[in-house]
Amino acid sequence: MIAMLHGQVASIDQSGVVLEVSGVGFDVRMPQTDLASLHSGQSATIYTSMAVTQDAITLYGFLLLAEKKMFLQLQKVSGIGPKVALSLLSTLPPDRLARAVADGDATALAKAPGLGKKGAQKIILELKGSLDLSQVEGASAPAQSPVDTGAQQVVEGLISLGWRQQDALDAVERACRDHGIATPIAEQDVPRVLKLALTELDRGR
């Protein structure tokens, strides 16, 4: 069982990353929130969980150990598999997800694509009272440092303008590389990088 990987992000797409570890590339599916904080060339520690089915062996990964614990906990609910569990963690961070379960907030859980109201109610029914909130509350910082919050702001801004996440990530990476902007992106450089990334995207149309 692969419990954790540490290496360099080789590439990122809409559903995960390829993490290079000692010359071997691992394809890791990750929550959208984690993907938004990573960029190619970055060193990363990813907590992993392997799912084996008749059709595939899939590696799921998380920047927070609390996310991995919640991912495994969610799959104890009947009818909840790794894809839905990942969708939930892409919608809510582990502390808010645990709080939604504790408060019986099916509406918050049902916002996750692929779940629905009945699935949310089942999660609450089966997990309420069994989650240790102390293990996940306040868990918001990834294991590796630093997190590129500047790049995340730029990517979120580009997505809000209608660009795909992968295109936005690539444009931010090119803008920083071509113009010598250091990463993690400093707060004062965010507007400049956003403008440069938009130029990159418009040029590629």
Image (tube, grey):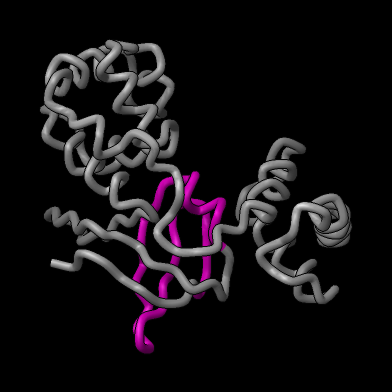
Q: Is residue 47 above or below residue 129?
A: below
Tell me, yes or no, if residue 205 can be seen here.
no
Q: From the top left corner, tell me how far across and down residue 143 is, in percent.
A: 40, 59
Q: Residue 122's image quarter?
A: top left
Q: Residue 86's image quarter?
A: top left
Relative depth, front residue between 152 and 144: 144
**Quarter of the rendering occupied by the N terminus:** bottom left
Relative depth, front residue between 86 and 4: 4
Magenta stretch contains residue 181: no
Q: From the top left corner, tell me how far across and down residue 4 is, in percent.
A: 26, 66
Q: Is residue 107 above or below residue 95?
A: above
Q: Residue at x 85, y 50 (%)?
A: 191
**Quarter of the rendering occupied by the C terminus:** bottom right
Q: From the top left corner, tell me how far across and down residue 68 is, in percent.
A: 26, 48
Does residue 184 appear left or right of residue 37 in this picture?
Answer: right
Q: Is residue 102 above or below residue 171?
A: above
Q: Residue at x 33, y 57 (%)?
A: 61
**Count of labels in the image:** 0
Q: Residue 75's image quarter?
A: top left
Relative depth, front residue between 140 and 68: 140
Q: From the top left corner, tell me how far across and down residue 175 is, in percent.
A: 79, 67
Does residue 98 appear left or right of residue 186 in this picture?
Answer: left
Magenta stretch contains residue 23: yes
Give the extent of the magenta segment: 10-38
Instruction: State the residue lying farthest toward the bottom.
Output: 23
Q: Is residue 10 above or below residue 193?
A: below
Tell me, yes or no, if residue 47 can be seen here.
yes
Q: Residue at x 29, y 41 (%)?
A: 83
Q: Residue at x 76, y 52 (%)?
A: 187
